[in-house]
Amino acid sequence: MKPESKIASGKTKTVYKLEDPSLVLIEFRDDVTALDGRRRDSIEGKGAINAAITAKLMQVLNSHGIPTHFVEFRSPSSIVAKKLSMIPLEVVCRNIAAGHLVKRLPFKEGSPLDPPIVEFYLKDDERGDPMVNARHIVALKLASFDEVAFMEETTLKVNEALKSFLASRGLTLIDFKIEFGRDPSGNLIIGDELDPDCMRIRDVSTGRVLDKDLYRQGKPLNEVLEAYLECRRRIVEGD
Ligand code: 5GP
């Protein structure tokens, strides 16, 4: 890929221009980060794994009538996607209490959340990605009230689709984070990624952790890679 075609580079992905101006190429790199980017490593092969898992899970969503930016997988570690104007929000959905939820609120780690919880966070590393509500989002002019309601409803639909697909692969979906962007007509579409970097996934029968929590916990990088490979085996190669 020519360096001049680079549009943006984030913590783990690089976005490139394509000849068709309505599309972009998103390359998933081997970088892994935690603590808002303050801890950083590289795990050889992780980019290819995450690109393949994102491609598969976005296809699952598309097959449920949930629009995503995914167009096609480009081996080994990229996807072609619709170009979106991204909204700087992280939308988190939780089925089982974990992570920040149990630090902030009196939920017991591992307890089921019924109904699932949807939360919005502002993407702002300097401020530690603070949680925001609909009125913050509207006052910050990031989205309208209707759009916030749409993002919440869509996130719950994504949750149902992913939960049942992952269950069919012997995996429990604890929680996940998605991001939305606008297409040129102003429609809100799911962008970014869907892989073990942005979801908590456990083996249904053993409870084995198969996601970035292993890196957050400081486990050896080969153990993190082995968990990601297991996710790809189940999610992509389990067809
Ligand atoms: P928590 O708020 O408990 O840290 O995370 C909830 C879920 O959202 C987890 O599945 C986590 O991986 C995902 N998540 C939250 N913030 C981020 C983020 O900044 N980047 C990524 N990739 N995932 C996040």
Image: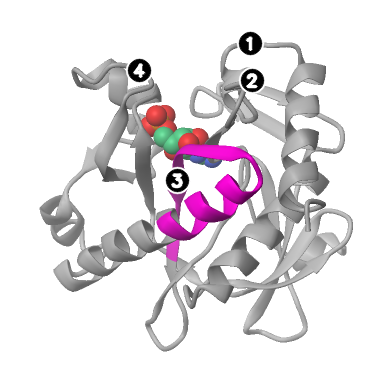
Label 2: which secondary element: helix
Is 18 located above or below residue 55 in the figure? below
- Residue beneath disc 4: 109
- Residue beneath disc 1: 218
- Mark 3 or mark 1, which is nearer the start of the sequence? 3
- Residue beneath disc 2: 215
Callout 3 crowding tier (Cα within 10 Å): few <14, some 14–19, many ≥20: many
Q: Is residue 56 magenta?
A: no
Label 1: which secondary element: loop
The residues bearing labels 1 and 3 have C-alpha atoms spaced at a distance of: 21 Å
Q: Amino acid at mark 4?
A: Glu
Q: Is residue 194 visible?
A: no
- Residue beneath disc 3: 177
Q: Amino acid at mark 2?
A: Tyr
The residues bearing labels 2 and 1 have C-alpha atoms spaced at a distance of: 5 Å
Does the residue at mark 2 contact the one at mark 1 (Cβ under 8 Å)? yes
Q: Is residue 132 visible?
A: yes
The residues bearing labels 2 and 4 have C-alpha atoms spaced at a distance of: 19 Å
- Mark 4 or mark 2, which is nearer the start of the sequence? 4
**Residue 76 screen position, x and y as percent:** 88, 55
Left or right of 67: which side holds 106?
A: left
Left or right of 143: which side holds 235?
A: right
- Mark 3 or mark 4, which is nearer the start of the sequence? 4
Q: Give the quadrant of residue 37.
A: top right
